[in-house]
Amino acid sequence: MESSTELLLAFLSIWVCISVFSNVSVIACILKNVNRSSVTSTDIFIISLAVNDILIAGVELPQQVHDLSHTEHFFEREWFEVFIFVIFVLSYIITFIDIEA
C-alpha cells in the first residue's frame, strides 16, 4: 500500500472515532440538561442530526476504510450500497420531519 493511502486510512479512522464520540457527547449533554417536560423541537432536531451523523460515521466511513484497504472486489459491496442509500433516505426523512415539527 502507498504511504498516501495509509495516511488517508489513518485520517479516516481517527475521523470516525472523533465523529462518533462527539455526537454521543452532544446527545448526552442534551439529555442531561433538558427536563423531560420541557423538550423543545430544537432539542429533538439536534438529537436526530447527531443520531444521523453517528449512523453515517459508524457505518459508511468504516466501509470506506475497508474499501481503501482491500482493493479486491467483494460481493457485499452492492448490498451495502443499498443499505447506505436507505440510511441516507431515512436521515433526510427524519430531518424533514424534525424541521416541520
Image: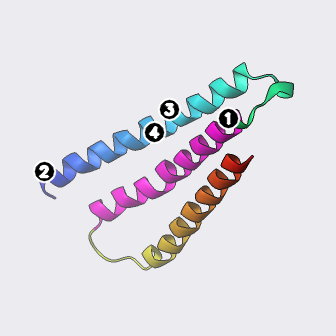
**Residue 53 placed where, x, y %?**
52, 46
Up the image or down, 77 lies above or below 9; here it is below
In the structure shown, which secondary structural element does the residue marked by tag 1 occupy? helix
For residue 3, the mark is: 2
Query: What's the residue at 43%, 74% (across, down)?
Result: 77
What is the distance, in whole Å, between disc 1 and disc 3 at their CAs? 18 Å
State if disc 3 and disc 1 touch (CB < 8 Å): no
Instruction: Say if mark 4 contacts mark 3, CB within 8 Å.
Output: yes
Residue at the outermost front position:
100
Determine crowd level at label 1: few under 14, some 14-19, many 20+ residues with C-alpha closer than 10 A. few
Q: Nearer the viewer, mark 2 or mark 4?
A: 4
Q: Dot 2, crowdedness within 10 Å: few (<14), some or many (≥20)? A: few
The residue stretch that appears in magenta: 42-70
Q: Earlier in the sequence, mark 2 or mark 4?
A: 2
- Circle 2: element type: helix
Task: Decide whether residue 51 is among the magenta residues.
Answer: yes
Q: Main secondary structure of the magenta part?
A: helix
| Front label number (1 vs 2) | 1
Q: Which residue is the site of mark 4?
A: 19
Task: Give the mark nearest the N terminus, 1 or 2.
Answer: 2
Ranked by sequence position, the earlier of labels 4 and 1 is 4
Q: Which amino acid does label 3 sit on?
A: Ser
Label 3 or label 2, whichever lies nearer to me, is 3
Q: Mark 1 points at which residue?
A: 42
